[in-house]
Structure formats: structure tokens, C-alpha cells
Amino acid sequence: MTAADMTGADRIVLIIGGGSGIGETTGHLMRARGWRVAIADRDSAAATRVASVLGGYGLAMDIAVEAEVERGAVAIEEKFGPVYGMVVAAAMFQDVLPPDKLPMAVWDRTLQVNLTGTYLANRAFGTRMARRGAGSIVNIASIAALGSMPVHAYGTSKAAVVSLTRNLAGEWGRAGVRVNAVSPGSTLVPRVEERLKSGRYAADPGTFTALGRMVRPNEVAEAIEFLASDRASAITGINLVVDAGWHVASTWAQHGGVRPAPKRD
């Protein structure tokens, strides 16, 4: 079957980091939209659990390990089918630390997972897509890539992911492969909800957004599925920000903050 022969039901999407959080939510949405879903995650039990619910294929994969990525690419395409879409949602986070307190081991591992891992996944699956003449990749970056934050390793790695996305969009465009990024703002995944409950945030991130709230996981998933789908067939090399207006409103603090909504009649 060639790319031109594929229907929506034939198209396989691989979600790396799909065992939890935004990746898991995206898997459910894409399955509901007719995609066949493969789940890869460092947590093999989580990958198997989500894939089983979605009627898909699950496997363990540490995207920071080149051999694991290549083995995974071979296994998925032999046992489940050719991957048309890929979402790279796996990431390593870090604590808020000044440079002199940030261990180099944390710096190295964060860049190895977030940047090198994204590159390895793009290289393994994007090259296969290019040979077939069709495919769509969505890399997950972050609003930390767009502004200044005290997460030096994480922010740097995600800014590099945005640059990598643009480079690969140019590399594979004539081969029929689109490569885009999505940068979520603070999103109400379980990890963030736990931080809100425990008081690890100095303030509710929603107070710094134009919409006055945080992002919901399904809102990020909608953006991802759109870019992966043929509805975005002329879109490549972009970074779609899904942040409830954090980027436009965060600098309003020096002017008293975003204005409240007017009273309704």
C-alpha cells in the first residue's frame, strides 16, 4: 500500500511517551479520530496498558538510547505496520535550580532525552516516512523554549527541539514529510496537578495567562492531532503554541496584570 492509497483507518500513529500525560490523552483522541495507535514509553507497563485500551501496539523504548529507538522502529513496522504519523511526547523535567546547583548529570540527561532523543526518534521514523513519500511528525516542545525561565537544562533542550523541527521540515519536505512542533503551556496533567496541591508552584500558573486558567490536556491533544492530520497538509516547520495566552499576558504584570472581564449585562 502506498501513501496515496491510505485511508484514515489505515494510518498508524506512534506516540512516544504515550504511557501518561499529554501523550496518553493524545492517544485516546487520535484513536477516536480513526487512527491506529502504537504507544512507546520508557515504562513498558504503561505502554502496554494504554495500547491495550486503544487496541494498538505497545512497547518499551528509551528514546535517549539509539539502539532502542532503531529496534523499536523495526518492531513496530514489522508487527503493526508502517508509521504514517509520529508524536514525540517523551521528556525529562528538572527542578528549579541556579546553574551552580544544577548537577551536570541532570543537564546531560535532560538534553540527552529531550533533544537527542527527539532527534533519534525523528531520524529513525522520519527517514522511513521519507522513503515511502508521506508522513507527519509532531514534536512536543514547551513555552519554556520561548521565554526566560529558571529551568536552564529543560528550557534549552526545548528551544533546541523547536530549531530541530524547522531543520527537519526543510530536510524532508520534498519527500512528503511534514514536521511541526507544539509548545504547551502549564497543562493540567497529573504531575502538574500534584505540584499545585503540594504548593511547589510559587503561584497558580493560570493567573499569568490571558484566559486566566491553565491548559487542559485535551486542548494540547487537539493541536497535535490537527498538525498530524491531512487537515494541516500545507503546514510544516511551525511551532504551535497552546498556552492559554501565557506568552502574550505574562509581561502584563508590570502594568498591573491582565484586566478582568467586564461585568456582563
Image: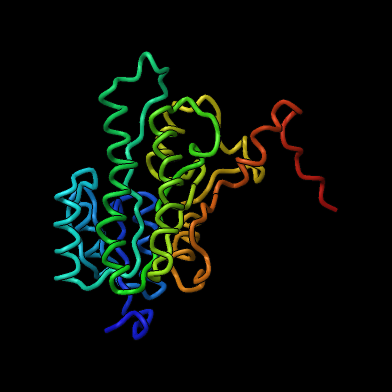
Residue lying at 34% horizontally and 53% vertically, measured from the top left: 88
Residue lying at 72% horizontally and 37% vertically, measured from the top left: 258
Total labels: the figure holds: 0
Is residue 215 rendered to the left or right of residue 212?
A: left
Is residue 39 rendered to the left or right of residue 178?
A: left
Quadrant, the N terminus: bottom left
Q: Is residue 146 above or below residue 86?
A: above
Residue 127 percent coordinates (x, y) = 28, 62
Residue 28 percent coordinates (x, y) = 36, 64
Q: Quadrant of residue 157?
A: top left
Residue lying at 26% horizontally and 50% vertically, measured from the top left: 120
Q: Is residue 190 above or below residue 170?
A: above
Is residue 38 rendered to the left or right of residue 264?
A: left
Q: Is residue 123 above or below residue 243?
A: below
Residue 104 percent coordinates (x, y) = 28, 22
Judge by depth and name the residue closer to the eye, 39 or 263: 39
